[in-house]
Image (cartoon, rainbow, N blue to C red):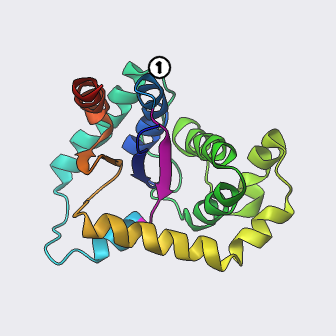
Amino acid sequence: MADPIIFYWDFTSPYAYIGANLIEAVAAKHDRSVDWRPLSLGHLWKAMPDRVPFPKSKMDYMAHDWERSARLHGLPIVKYPDPFPADAKLPRLLFYRLKAQDPARAAAFAKAVFRQYWGEGKDIAKPEQLAGILKAQGIADSELAAAAEDGAARQAVIDATAEAGRLQAFGTPTFVVDGEMFWGSDRIDHIDRWLARKD
């Protein structure tokens, strides 16, 4: 099988929520897998020496756009979950803990967390807020406490954030396909067409 599509993302990004629900079908179409790599978007931005704040007009447009984009793909979405942005540290750590055991299970967990936050507008920061997802997916409650203390998971977040920074990524979702970077869920169609040229 060819190299995987690398997928950098954060739970705090509505476009990553959309991308998480679309990228696997495109990857499968071209006999690719997806390597899910959550990062800390806040830390990625803090490391940028030339970052500028979003003007309010751009933020207002983006909120309208991510709502419209999700609906066009048949995904439920809340324009502004409560709180926005979320503290996504714990689910990121649990994702990497699960990925070390079973990448497919980790991806299913990520999609469920995305849906709870962006699809239902519910917080994802605390163990009790993730309990329903764990129960539905047969993940032991003890995994949350273990994830919070998991040094390898913490390092994986740091490493993914640093990798994205070296690529000069500036937001999520960011996809890397055979060294070519694509930013945004609206570029998944481009990824499909790019890979079709190579098949």
Answer left or right for 1 relative to 95: left
The vertical placement of 114 against 37, above or below, is above
**Along the viewing direction, whichever of 109 and 52 lies nearer the viewer:** 109
Q: Is residue 175 visible?
A: yes
Asked whether residue 38 is drawn in magenta, I would say yes
**Above-or-below relation of 125 to 9:** below
Residue 13 makes an appearance in the image: no
Task: Say above or below: 59 vs 43.
Answer: above
> Which of the 4 image quadrants contains residue 146?
bottom right
Task: Assign the C terminus to one quadrant of the image.
Answer: top left
Q: Residue at x 69, y 75 (%)?
A: 150
What is the secondary structure assignment of the residue under circle 1? loop
Q: Where is residue 143 in the image (x, y as percent from the top left)?
A: 80, 63
User: Which residue is painted at 17% across and 70% down in the image?
Assistant: 51
Q: In this view, does 135 lie to the left or right of 54?
A: right
- Give the answer, above or below, for where 100 lies relative to 104: below
Position of residue 183 measured from the top left corner of the image (x, y, whole percent) = 26, 46
Q: Position of residue 80 (x, y in %)?
A: 44, 45
Residue 173, given in percent of the width and then of the height, sits at 36, 48
Q: Is residue 113 magenta?
A: no
Q: Tell me which corner region of the image, top left, top right, bottom left or bottom right, holds residue 89.
A: bottom right
Check disc 1: other Cα within 10 Å, few if <14, some if 14-19, many if 20+. few
Task: Kindly identify the amino acid type of the residue bearing the numbered disc 1.
Answer: Gly
- Residue sitting at x 34%, y 28%: 69
| Residue pointed to by mark 1 | 74
Magenta extent: 32-40
